[in-house]
Amino acid sequence: MSQTVDRAPRTPATQPAPPVVDVAALGQHLMGRWADIRRVSRAVAARPEMKRVEGLSMADHRARVLDQLGLLVKEGAVHKAFPKSVGGLEDAGGNIAQFEELVLADPSLQIKAGVQWGLFGSAVMHLGTEEHHTKWLPGIMSLEIPGAFAMTETGHGSDVSAVGTTATYDEATHEFVIDTPFRAAWKDYLGNAALHGEAAVVFAQLITKGVNHGVHAFYVPIRDKKKNFLPGVGGEDDGLKGGLNGIDNGRLHFTGVRVPRTNLLNKYGDVAEDGTYSSPIASPGRRFFTMLGTLVQGRVSLDGAATVVSKLALTIAISYGSQRRQFTAASDTEEEVILDYQRHQRRLLPRLAETYAMSFAHDVFLDKFDDVFSGAHDTDADRQDLETLAAALKPLSTWAALDILQEAREACGGNGFLVENRLTSLRADMDIYATFEGDNNVLLQLVAKRLLTDYSRKFATADAGAMAAFVAEQVGDAAINRTGLRRLGQSIVDWGSTARSVGYIRDTDSQRQLLTDRVQTMVAEIAARLRPASKLPKMEAAQLFNSNQNALIEAARAHGELLQWEAFTDAVERIEDDGTRQVLTWLRDLFGLGLIEKNAAWYLIHGRISTQRAQAITSYIDDRLLPRLREHALPLVAAFEFTPEHIGAPIALGAEKERQDEAMEYYRAQRESGTAPIAEKAPAKAVRSR
Amino acid sequence: MSQTVDRAPRTPATQPAPPVVDVAALGQHLMGRWADIRRVSRAVAARPEMKRVEGLSMADHRARVLDQLGLLVKEGAVHKAFPKSVGGLEDAGGNIAQFEELVLADPSLQIKAGVQWGLFGSAVMHLGTEEHHTKWLPGIMSLEIPGAFAMTETGHGSDVSAVGTTATYDEATHEFVIDTPFRAAWKDYLGNAALHGEAAVVFAQLITKGVNHGVHAFYVPIRDKKKNFLPGVGGEDDGLKGGLNGIDNGRLHFTGVRVPRTNLLNKYGDVAEDGTYSSPIASPGRRFFTMLGTLVQGRVSLDGAATVVSKLALTIAISYGSQRRQFTAASDTEEEVILDYQRHQRRLLPRLAETYAMSFAHDVFLDKFDDVFSGAHDTDADRQDLETLAAALKPLSTWAALDILQEAREACGGNGFLVENRLTSLRADMDIYATFEGDNNVLLQLVAKRLLTDYSRKFATADAGAMAAFVAEQVGDAAINRTGLRRLGQSIVDWGSTARSVGYIRDTDSQRQLLTDRVQTMVAEIAARLRPASKLPKMEAAQLFNSNQNALIEAARAHGELLQWEAFTDAVERIEDDGTRQVLTWLRDLFGLGLIEKNAAWYLIHGRISTQRAQAITSYIDDRLLPRLREHALPLVAAFEFTPEHIGAPIALGAEKERQDEAMEYYRAQRESGTAPIAEKAPAKAVRSR
């Protein structure tokens, strides 16, 4: 129970003063490297004309979001990512930081902006060359050319390499002929395709001289200025979706649509006039993944948006939970504040810890993204590391956002179900984040395959020293406590011992060891089971991989969680204010110990912790961390710096407290005046007298 | 991988013929005791005029659902639950069975019908007496009197006993004066209140002669026939909600509203003309809970509706998953069916097992409900058992429905996000089911308190025999295998032993023992920790309970899961067809072993299973149960007997297969005709030649 009401403070002699969070400093820390850009973007997001209006028809919502994109153009907010040669700023990281904050206004706005500039424009920029930039980027940036990113098909989302759309070179006319030869090949779920788009970057199998060179990107005009489809182009509206209805998603199909040879976005592959194919990348597989890799910014911004939304959801739920009261317990007249209930703390505070982890991990991710796309560090290895980071973090944050929104909604009861309190619309919009820009389960498999590849490169023979170095490389961070890692091989035996003090588990190095060891062991075990695969026939090899698919995904998840934990830990170490650093350390402990608790069965099975220590973790969370952190819950969400315009939800802006105060005053006055009725005590007469 | 494509069947000599599910017989089994009523209701739900039309404005959706209620009246579908004295059938169970199937048409229809007849009408029936029945039930049944169930207030949902609305008796005029003295006391979230309702059953503190006798129910007219509020009555529209927008939820407030003394629904408490209170139940607390207990049918129908919706969601996801293909693995030309992926099986098949458990548990629940409300077995103990059953099952099924809908949506990718495929709208509508008719976390605490009460009655001294009997009583089912329970005390030691064969864990008795033991042990541990409470001052006692709140809820969840498992097991034993019973046994094993796996840490910590057995459970699920059950996934959802009209989702009605077939035919014909392009193999020229 909260000890802040009605009790005399304990004398200093009995207890140290509790730490205090410096909200402003913490807020600055959370804003990170592009704090100024984020704050400007948030101010834009707070404007009435940018906000989501609930209850609009689909047509009106779509029109409103298109207008909002126009406002962003007027703001000059669009230029950050684009090349200086066309008036851009080439600020890759700043651009993402700016756009992900727009989710606060309306996820449809964030995503439609992402489609136009982050996918359509980005594809022209990264897959095209100078002539394409000059010809099309200005119109894309100004919104004169609304466009679609036509990669996904009804039949192929995850396996882009297998799309059915073809672009066949006609040597006679020097044109590519674009075709969608069957229904499943129709491009689908494309923002801007149903209404507004006048062009599309179409991903198709490039066929020339009877050879299929794999998927390439083509700039294809699709509508004239009157929004009529051009000859050979057709489409459908996807209709109502579960959310994001401010975006005109639709389908496109192509029947003999001809585009000039030079409409091939030819940075990674080209076709000469005579139809000869050439590419700076010899391997078709590598070429394809290199092209896809340039489009990773979508995943970066989704990770960021999911984090922003999670922060907002918890701000609403924790604000409300600090005001809402229900049931008397310690007092006869005053009901308990619901955030004082252990269960309520269990539901919300670990999610708050997770959200802080997501936020700091996103900063690392965005840093890495900017490093690569600014050219500061953009070797193949850097790009692959960025891919892996994206594939690990995007699933965790987007799934977390959905769970956090749902938990927040339930924690706000009937109030939470009213659209005005934001949570239900956000959840409906965020649903698709788990499966677009990469299906979360597929992405985690990409991570797992990367982990296996790295493992197999290093462990032709098992070698503890090499294993430790491998682990160091995996977490990829020079700030790793070398002492901790050196102890890895030595102290595994210790974990099973019950002689260790409970305090040992709270130690940062202990958390790091346990989390790191789990990733490493899971990968090693899977690698051992998969070792026979290279000698098996195709079908048996596929079955062997399939029977390890779940384990692969869980190993990847563990890797992603470790990345989040590392980022959280590094961020905490950089906090200068003692009080803030203490509270954030507890919050980080809640995150790390929560991960260990969640996977306690694994740790027990592998002899990494004793049963006593497993129980001690749960007790420490329940009895120490949760009540402690409850006291700091409001400052911890205040540090997210959301203004009332961002929050929007009446229940998080004082409405609940107002009602509580009015009710309490009514009863207090009633008691004081002696007019309160007496509660029935004695048994009533058993006989009716009507 | 599925072995049904392109492989010769194994010869009988090497493997027994796989069992076959008798879909029709299983379907009948699932339909249960009120099969005929359910099928009639489903036929009604399938009619075009009853179906949900997506994309309607809130106003149009509300009007449509009101019309649908009128159609139900015309059908004579309303009369089942009501007394014969007013033309009803007094068929409590059949009534619920009928109305829960309506969720297939539109959850708004199911809930608004529930508000009108299951809450408003039910309150008049169960809390009122003959004169009230005669005066109001016919109009309620005919929909001439649309009405609201005015219990919840903006400030009080879970703690009904603390509502702020008062009904003060005026001895001079023989009237009750209804007041909502502050904003938090406004009745809120009431279906029928925003537009259609002309009366309400209002729950208010009954005050007479200066004594507050606690919450009672009053019949209060609120609007005239022109839908204008009557004097002293006011309200607001709740506005857009996250779902269920076919229901006009709103708020009501009362200022000096006078109703005749006889408008008190006086079955459990009465006020004479002179203001004297009387009641057949002496204790105010017991009286209040007895009144609330008569309204348990809401929870019964939510449990049923959540189960129906889960069945539909899995039908859609499994149908689609059996047609959708992505990525080649075993073959070079044919992509894998996604339900052949281990991860996809892990995501969907345990949920299918859970849904079967929910279904059979709901049948037990509905049976018990009918027993009590038909008068066949309606002692106080029976009613309390029914309350506990409701409080245990409703949370599990409503939470499961949300998780299942989300998993199904993600498993159907972009297709799943299109409203036409049903999943997103159902999820939005089902959201509130987790917190209305009892917040799930609060309900589980009610269960826990019941478990503790029963425990403390029996265990003044610890006694293994009494413990076993206690457990038997808790699961409350004569079909319990006595051998299993007798072994409970003896064989706990065995579980830690690694000498036992793996097969032992699959045994029905083994599952029962492990699941039962966990509930019992959790309750005993909490009871031990709470033992000091009765001697502590109020605040310390409250803190002690609070620090065990999470454990209490988890013990209650374990109890509910055991109830589901028992119902599943009993239902499987009643299946006559050998093949069907074999498959259902595997499905039940997946459910039971899944519960044990989920709580493996607990079992390991308490020495109930060895680490080897814990790993063996996961291997058995992954390597044996999932692939085995995948083969029966389609029959298992076919047994839900949904027609194409119920399913509605194009992706579950063959659209995906059509597209797959067309694509495959295109490529096959292309290969056959020799016109297929050759895949690029050799490195391309590194030099550009544009």
Image (tube, coloured by chain):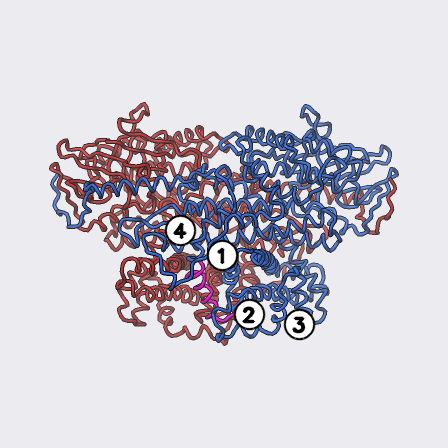
Chain colours: A red, B blue
Please report whichever mark, 2 or 4, sits nearer to the chain's N-terminal start.
4
On screen, residue B347 above or below A482 = above
Q: Is residue A293 left or right of residue B509?
A: left
Please report whichever mark, 3 or 4, sits nearer to the chain's N-terminal start.
4
Badge 1 amino acid: Gly
Residue in view at x 25 percent, y 51 percent: A378
Q: Quadrant of residue A301?
A: top left
| Label drawn at residue B579 | 1
Single out the mark in the foreground, 1 or 2: 1
Residue B609 falls inside the magenta stretch = yes
Badge 4 amino acid: Leu
On screen, residue B48 above or below B635 = above
Please report whichever mark, 3 or 1, sits nearer to the chain's N-terminal start.
3
Please report whichever mark, 2 or 3, sits nearer to the chain's N-terminal start.
3
Using the numbered discs, state the Cα–Cα distance from disc 3 to disc 1 in whole angstroms: 39 Å
Classify mark 4: helix, strand or loop.
helix
Classify mark 3: helix, strand or loop.
helix
Classify mark 1: helix, strand or loop.
helix
| Label drawn at residue B606 | 2
Q: Could you say which is closer to the camera, residue B404 or residue B187? A: B404
Using the numbered discs, state the Cα–Cα distance from disc 3 to disc 4 in whole angstroms: 47 Å
Pointer 3 residue = B464
Relative image position of residue A521 (x, y in whole percent): 37, 66
- Whether residue B498 is visible, yes or no, is yes
The magenta stretch is: B607-625
Using the numbered discs, state the Cα–Cα distance from disc 2 to disc 3 in whole angstroms: 17 Å
| Label drawn at residue B339 | 4
Q: Could you say which is closer to the camera, residue B343 or residue A378? A: B343
Q: Quadrant of residue A174?
A: top left
Q: Specify whether disc 3 shares its chain with disc 4.
A: yes
